[in-house]
Amino acid sequence: MAKEREISDLSPWEDAQKMIAKAGREGVNLVWDRLKDQTPHCTFCEQGLTCSKCVMGPCRINPKGPKKMLGVCGADADLTVARNFGRFVAAGAAAHSDHGRDLLETLAAIGEGKTTDYGIRDEAKLERICKELGIDVEGLSVQERAKALANLFFEDYGCRSHNVAFSSRAPQKRKDLWERFGCTPRGIDRDCVEMLHRTHMGVDCDPVSICLHAGRVALGDGWGGSMIATEVSDIIFGTPKPVKSTVNLGVLREDQVNILVHGHSPIVSEMILAATREPAILAKAKEAGATGINIAGLCCTGNELLMRQGVPMAGNHLMTELAIVTGAVEMVIVDYQCIMPSLVNVAGCYHTKFVSTSDKAKFPGGIHMEFNYNNAREKAREAVLMAIEAYSLRDPDKVEIPSKPMSITSGFSNEAILGALGGTPEPLIQALQAGKVRGVVGIVGCNNPKLKHDHVHVNLAQELIKRDILVLATGCATVAMGKAGLLEPEASSRAGAGLAEICQALGIPPVLHVGSCVDNSRILHICAVLANYAGLDISDLPVAASAPEWYSEKAAAIGLYAVASGIYTHLGLPPHILGSSMITTLALKGLDDVFGACFAVEPGPLQAAELIDERIKAKRVALGWPA
Ligand code: MSK
């Protein structure tokens, strides 16, 4: 594939560059090769101007005319773009929320005594959330509380009796605004299904109305499906606390059985981790000649294990193929989301077993082992034993583990952050008022091979902390931050004087790892906590979000729920909406009049930092705080 000089244009990291070169030598096809083959992309698709939703078409709309200005049904460019974008957001919201449902089904199984493989690790959080949502816990056992909470959350999905329960956490002004614009999230499944209905030919023909409904769908994700996923994961697997770990491909061990967990849910990966700690299984690894079993994470399943268990992180989205190219990975075991189908082929170039575990995410050519709450412990043992067997098939000539791991600190749940502040948001509000911390920005999301790997993440974060802006990171952005050394308390020396002072006083890094991509709900929640405490709306706060290298439908849903919650949101790349000037203007400007926040698109990290800083300054001035 790429030559040395080109390789350094793809990724700044030593581990990535070495593995891209190795893949080239060994004839392994990578994401960048396929991007090259697919470039240039179809310009109609890029602009959101294609429609294949019925068989009168497919249609390609040319808004400039003179021909093809309308699809066969009569839809113009604005409607076509709106329909496509609405479905894009609904798919992302569905993915997060269905992940949440799996956690919920596990919680229900615990409550109904149908599983002994899973239990409740954070009983205090279970009680706290039950009380917050109005469940009378008096006299109820832990199991009964789990069942009652699961039943309440199941209602959030279908929703016949109440709005999405956690929307109660939003400030009253925000809830009133949602009500005024018809955006209150009513039911997670209901609003996703309604989006599919509205965008069927001949239903909602008003592009603005479709976009507002997209806002409601996204809010159902942020304050519904994702927040349920986060909170229920904490209840079952434990609420994260600060924990030390390491990151990059250097976390792989030449002398151990390496198992990579990939995807998003902690349900399978926690069981795999537990199996590797069983003495009988460890003994098997030793019999096979390994000194132990090394679990490392990829993407957000990795984030889940890192946040709660301190399990090292091998890499983010663009590192998933490269991790296998090390030749040192016995098994990649996946649940769902962000798993490139190409991984099966890459694994086939080495001795690596590729194992899928969910009935909704099957990969032809891989090994499928279906996990559920009844068999998870047993299946996990089976999978780990299979990885141990694969260790003997490893070809030492093909093994290359690049770079030394970087140390990181993870585990900053909202409980941990508030705990560090003494149990109240008051010190953070005071620091914000005084301008020691000028603002808070969530840098979230993926990698995209169209942009240099992790370049925007790292440079944007560095520029923001210099300007005394605290960064909260989730998803694949966290790996970039860790590799750049920004997730350690010592990185406060790279921050502005005010932020450095606060970080040093609390012993925290200037970039806090707050979780996986569903854990963006933690950022929504902490914004709501700050706003409620200060008697403000979220849109009044000096906060912003950024998804600098995003690629997925889920990221679009995240961006839209951030904006609809009042958080100005930067994107490094535009979604496929540029074919409609109406929808583009709405995204970049018009939404400000609706939600008090809008999108900005800017690929350059320094320019993005400037835009975000301008917005933060404006919010600070409006509050009468020093700019
Ligand atoms: S895994 S959605 S590439 S953050 Fe959550 Fe990473 Fe983005 Fe997937």
Image: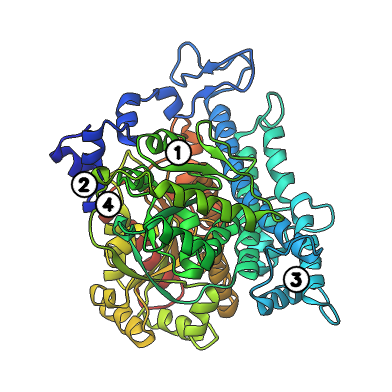
Disc on res. 613: none
Query: Which of the two labelled residues, at mark 1 and mark 4, occupies the earlier sequence position?
Result: 1
Which residue does the numbered mark 2 point to in the structure image?
18
Please state which of the two labelled residues, at mark 3 or mark 2, is closer to the viewer.
2
Which residue does the numbered mark 1 point to in the structure image?
340
Residue sitting at x 40%, y 34% = 348
Judging from the image, the colouring scheme is: rainbow
CB of residue at label 3: within 8 Å of ligand 1? no
Whole-number angstrom distance, CA of label 1 to CA of label 4: 21 Å
Whole-number angstrom distance, CA of label 3 to CA of label 2: 51 Å
Dot 4 alpha-carbon crowd within 10 angstroms: few under 14, some 14 to 19, many 20 or more:
many
CB of residue at label 4: within 8 Å of ligand 1? no
Whole-number angstrom distance, CA of label 3 to CA of label 1: 38 Å
Which residue does the numbered mark 4 point to in the structure image?
455
> Pointers 3 and 4 in contact (CB under 8 A)?
no
Query: Which of the two labelled residues, at mark 3 and mark 1, occupies the earlier sequence position?
Result: 3
Question: What amino acid does circle 2 point to?
Answer: Lys
**In the picture shown, does residue 294 fall above or below 136?**
above
Q: Quadrant of the N terminus?
A: top left
Question: What amino acid does circle 1 point to?
Answer: Met
Query: Which of the two labelled residues, at mark 4 and mark 2, occupies the earlier sequence position?
Result: 2
- Left or right of residue 264, residue 468 in this image: left
Please state which of the two labelled residues, at mark 2 or mark 1, is closer to the viewer.
2
Residue situated in front as seen by the camera: 355 or 69: 355
Question: What amino acid does circle 3 point to?
Answer: Leu
The secondary element bearing badge 3 is classed as loop
Whole-number angstrom distance, CA of label 3 to CA of label 4: 41 Å
Residue 216 location in percent, x, y?
Answer: 65, 49
- Left or right of residue 546, residue 485 in this image: left
Query: Which of the two labelled residues, at mark 3 and mark 2, occupies the earlier sequence position?
Result: 2
Which residue does the numbered mark 3 point to in the structure image?
133
Dot 3 alpha-carbon crowd within 10 angstroms: few under 14, some 14 to 19, many 20 or more:
some
